[in-house]
Amino acid sequence: QEAAKYGKKVMVLDFVTPTPLGSSWGLGGTCVNVGCIPKKLMHQAALLGQALQDSRKFGWQFTEEVKHNWMTMTESVQNYIGSLNWGYRVALREKSVTYENAYGEFVGPHTVKATNKRGVEKLYTAEKFLIATGERPRYLGIPGDKEYCISSDDLFSLPYCPGKTLVVGASYVALECAGFLAGLGLDVTVMVRSILLRGFDQEMANKIGEYMEEHGINFIREFVPIKVEQIEEGTPGRLKVTAKSTKGNQIIEGEYNTVLLAIGRDACTRNIGLDKVGVKINEKTGKIPVNDEEQTNVPYIYAIGDILQDKLELTPVAIQAGRLLVQRLYAGATSKCDYVNVPTTVFTPLEYGACGYSEETAMEKFGEENIEVYHSHFWPLEWTVASRDNNKCYAKIICNIKDNERVIGFHVLGPNAGE
Amino acid sequence: GKNEYDLVVVGGGSGGLACAKEAAQFGRKVAVLDYVEPSPQGTKWGLGGTCVNVGCIPKKLMHQAALLGSALKDAQHYGWNIAQPVQHTWSVMAQAVQNYVKSLNWGHRVQLQDKKVKYFNMKGSFSDPHTIRGLTKAGKETVITAENVVIATGGRPKYPTHIPGALEYGITSDDLFWLKESPGKTPLVYYPFILHLYETIVYIALIDASPDVSLECAGFLTGIGLDTTVMMRSIPLRGFDQQMASLVTEHMECYGTKFLKRCFPIKVEKLESNRLQVIWKNTDLGTEETDSFDTVMWAVGRAPDTETLNLETVGVKTNSETGKIIVDASEATSVPHIYAIGDITEGRPELTPTAIASGKLLAQRLFGRSSELMDYDNVPTTVFTPLEYGCVGLSEEAAVQCYGSDNIEVYHAYYKPLEFTVAERDATQCYMKMVCLRESEQRILGLHFIGPNAGEVIQGFALGIKCGATYPQLMKTIGIHPTCAEEMTKLHITKRSGLDATVTGC
């Protein structure tokens, strides 16, 4: 959209390869369809469930039994997403950006092949290319994973209530999904291989986990699934999960209606013909290394978003990088995307917002004796009358003593953490 | 010294308690006098001042009760099955709120004890510049002498006493939060008078300071299901950005609060049924109108609580118009060792956090070898109306007045909170704007935000304003997705351009 503003002839190729279970979606990418948007809406549904309980203490009266209807929620969420897909198509049209719902891959210098879902192929040439294909959920590579397990790609449009769910993983995706599923009244278990929220401040990560545990979510720590079998077909059906301890030979079994895999995401860079044009990728991770102007090793090919190596996987970062890139290419601007001190929020039942260094990283970089950590538990006023936990919300700021006590890390665990 | 106490604080509210506790940290001998004169309707409360007892705290809790009412409606859209009808019971809410407030009263007493601050539940007044006379409810007298005195007695709601019936039959915010019973079919008599909060009229006379408490009260009363009317003589939220004020009241109207604009009451009479008949003048039509209500709540401003302090005896000067105590940048009054902080001081914001901060800094200057003065610039605030309004810095009008409209740029946006989409809620008044200087650096002069959790949103940006944030710096700040606050980092449509300021989230 930004490039079209400068009168450039622009084309966007977008295609969604269906999940192993057949889920697919429209224009807009992960955030709109199977990420931020549906996630936050379902998180909101769970928060409203809590609000219902709080409201009784504030004088509201209604029947004791309150149940949640998965289909009502999911339909509303999908309708909203549909309106966003539509909105994007309209916006592209209005800005005269050509849009093709086709799978793009490089076939030679300056040339891509676009294949639509009916298999019709077309070739296009361009002066410059931008790769922004993002990622898709990773599977475990164990018997039964693709046949019987779902991922976040399936969850937000699941046409039936998932029921008793096992969430495999300890990423923010895993914890956010486990969080709202439990908030909607489902029996949720999280199976964690080692630590929670790798890469995040671990004190905060553990507090998040503790809160979730205290609020009814089961955690199985230091186990990984080795087999998923179907006991009974259905929507949902019944699955048997066999798991092995990471610390020994112990084997456990469990029965669930749904198994949600959230163990990580892989970049969509292996099957788009990058080898044909010589774009180097990190063979292990599939991610594309770029310079500070988002340029790959091939000068006319750029990349942004989740597929970038050593960069943050966040929508606002991708948007900012994309806009600034185009302004540098076509409007003579020089501003580069600033990837430092980007704030983020994890929308777990107790939300966690952070910006800057984790305590561990700060100590590592500056030395324990050079940092001062100010911290406090707090009790949100709205929780008092509602009789909710009075020592769970927590905030800390990490300061660099040597630099005028500059705040280098900011962490808050509590309601509305993002705001 | 020859005086008994190093510091005597008259007034145990936000400012007074903060100052006293800070002074005690330096090992000083400190005493606090706190006394609550009952309201005309007989309401009184414990230690902690306005904020804790009849201000911020109960107000926000009742606002929360109203918000939860909206949440119940939203919840159905999100799949929660709640059988209708849904009802609100005032007494359950009021009791919970009052119990919490009482726990805070208790907490404050314990804190004073822990910090070895002497507490007198007495009404203080000056006998001479270093002598305070304390009087208990029963009339018992205690006299103490002080090296330094801090006056922090705050204010109380005014009554429009020129209106017949106003004092006898009306209540104020002092009473609202302590009502034990609501309306209902069979009201219970807990107090010497029966109050039906079935229909409430809130009258705001905008003669002086912005009584946003009144709009906030009208807001939550509507939210919990009461048929509420606001009568206004002139403009709402005087002193605040007027565009934002009108969006706030517009939303309240859509939300269900009735407004009688450009009207003022002439008389209040009690009917046999115990309801109140109010006669008012409609200045637009030039006619007199009348209707009956269960409760009439006055929100015509607050008067500083200085009458019984005996300030003239010791020479502490007050502003002849407002009655507030005149202080300099170090909170000193016209008498060198007598200071004043909080709502009672002339020209200061009537806010808890500024009272607390100034109280602490004062104690640090008096006893801790500090010389840091209180910075009253760019203090963020929030009005907790049904759709909240948070702001920091200059209003658009003030900026135009200060710099000229050619020298400022206003970036703005109408946005829709993600949570409103599935809930099918109207976001017409969800709006934000940023007032900047137009010259090269483009320093941000004021930020204004209407939407959910406005206080949470503005709090963070207030730090930026304090640090002299500019428009380019804000544009370089990456937003958190999906939130309402992120829209601030994306503001790019100017009022000057005349373009449609509606933005879509994703």
Image (spheres, grey):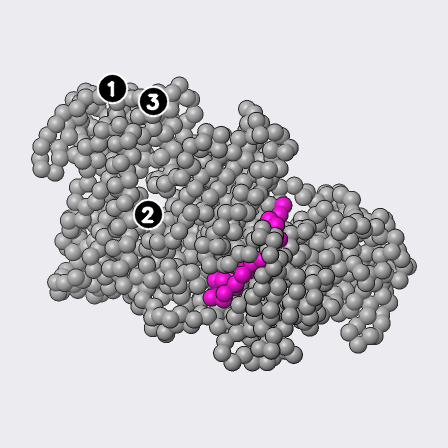
Q: Which residue is mark 2?
A: A37
Question: Are discs 3 and 2 both within one chain?
Answer: yes
Q: Secondary structure at mark 1?
A: loop
Q: Are marks 1 and 3 in contact (CB under 8 Å)?
A: no
Q: Are marks 1 and 2 on the same chain?
A: yes
Magenta range: B217-239
The x, y position of residue B149, in whole percent, is 81, 56
Viewer-closest of A347 and A256: A347
Q: Is residue A230 above or below residue A290?
A: below
Q: Quadrant of residue A7?
A: top left
Measured as percent of width and height from the top left, residue B470 is found at 54, 32
Indicate the quadrant where residue B271 lies: bottom right
- Characterize the local packing of mark 3: few (<14), some (14-19) or many (20 or more) Cα atoms within 10 angstroms: few
Question: Which label's residue is closer to the chain start, 1 or 3?
Answer: 3
Q: Is residue A171 shown to the viewer in this render? A: no
| Residue, disc 3 | A6
The residue carrying mark 1 is A127
Q: Nearer the viewer, residue A31 or A345?
A: A31
The chain holding disc 2 is: A
Residue drawn at x 50%, y 45% is B449
